[in-house]
Amino acid sequence: MDMKSRVHCLVLPYPAQGHINPILQFSKLLEHEGVRITLVTTRFYFKNLQKVPPSIALETISDGFDNGPSVAESSKAYLDSFRQVGSETLAELLEKLESLGAHVDCVIYDAFFPWVLDVAKRFGILGAAFLTQNMAVNSIYYHVHLGKLEAPLTQDEISLPSLPKLHHEDMPSFFFTYAQDPTLLDLVVAQFSNIHKADWILCNTFHDLDKEIVDWFMKIWPKFRTIGPNIPSMFLDKKYKDDQDYGVTRFKPEECLDWLDDKPKGSVVYVSFGSLAIFDEKQMEELAWSLRECSSYFLWVVRESEQIKLPKDFEKKTEKGLVVTWCSQLEVLAHEAIGCFVTHCGWNSTLETLCLGVPTIAMPYWSDQSTNAKFTADVWKMGIRAPIDEKKFVGREALKHCISKIMESDEGKEMKNNAIQWKKLAIAAVSEGGSSRKNTIEFANNLFNS
């Protein structure tokens, strides 16, 4: 098909790995339906991208901080600048593409950027909001937007339509930092400020996982569709043989699969807290000794900047354990040696572990992670939440108890079985005739027919 005659989508994620990965994964699916994709990121983030799928064009806009957002005086100053300068430079990009004969038909934008929809509408371009978080979390923020939930929280128990009863420990952390700095809660609530004007609302989940809440939202947003889980095909339906990673990375992998190959099936505890969590030395020490003293092997990802917090005499490579600065999480979770995952419960990590049938021990750090942990343990029943003491630490004995519960008990076998059932439902959702597959095709067909 001639490039100029193809439907052209501009895809604009928030410039962070956890936002880029799922939206880019969805873009690859659209490409298979004949849609032309241009990924847009900030000039600063662009410098750090080491690899992008060759079929996807790359363009940049400015957030006002082309040498890096760290010089912004606050997160509010950064986001305000991004809205103003981003709107201007996005408009310039749309004009440039139009002049080159690369007319944009639709902008798929991270819902963290509601202002993108305003720019798209000014150009008469279709807009699709992409929600990167769990639908329960989206519902919580939506009800703040409606004025039906307030920060700071005044009630001990939170009741929202189609959700289980939630308590303070199940709520996103931004409710509890709101008094000191309202910026982050304002950011996530603003996703819904103009979402009713979007031509589509897409979410990185699948219908069977969030059935009740998805059906509730469908009544409010008729153009709402689940299109996930957005992880590479080779770890799901295996339809696209070349789709083995997200295809955009800022890290060089470190070899740990050889180490796993020598370990018995289901014998290794995998520990990783994503790219943002920062623990103090006391928590790192408790983690280190619980792993060393538990009866399982362990693979622990500790970012380079965090390694200084490891106990001085803690060996990074032994027969029992391996500490690395980075690994391919999907490949590790897919390895048969892995028996459980100690995780911060970021949404991408939660979906990955669910898609690969691995039970979890949840140690949420911030943002939406407490809500994801609640659902992992109490709704999807594929893990447990590590208990915290009065100083908010997960102690070594508590974590050791969690590990033995999942790795050695009948209850752990049940969680493993539940995880495998969710894996089957995730694969079904993206396979021929599955809910997410049908929604993706419907979305692509609408683009061609609009």
Image (cartoon, rainbow, N blue to C red):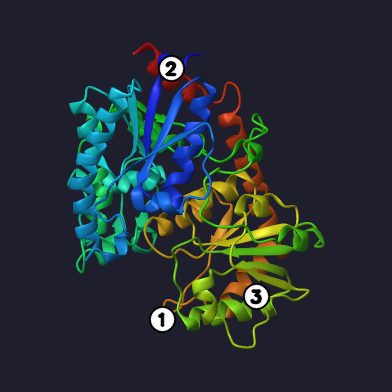
Residue 371 visible in the displayed image:
yes
Q: Quadrant of the C terminus?
A: top left
Question: Residue 254: x and y, percent?
Answer: 65, 61
How would you rate the neighbour count of disc 2 (Cα within 10 Å): few for under 14, some for 14-19, many for 20 or more? some
Q: Which mark is residue 391?
A: 1
Determine whether, in the image, residue 128 is placed left or right of residue 143: right
Q: Identify the amino acid type marked 2.
A: Arg
Q: Give the image quarter of residue 317.
A: bottom right
Q: Is residue 221 visible?
A: no
Of helix, strand and loop, which one carries label 1?
Answer: loop
Of labels 2 and 3, the one closer to you = 2
**Label whose residue precedes the other's in the sequence (2 or 1):** 2
Query: Is disc 3 surrounded by few (<14), some (14 to 19) or many (20+) residues within 10 Å?
Result: many
Outermost residue, front side: 100
Q: Which residue is mark 3?
A: 291
Q: Position of residue 175 (x, y in %)?
A: 27, 61
Q: Nearer the viewer, mark 1 or mark 3?
A: 3
Q: What percent of the width, then of the height, locates residue 53?
A: 54, 38
Label 2 – label 1 distance at C-alpha = 57 Å
Q: Earlier in the sequence, mark 2 or mark 3?
A: 2
Say above or below: 296 vs 139: below
Which disc, if any, is residue 6? 2
Q: Compare residues 123 and 139 and report the one nearer the observer.
A: 123
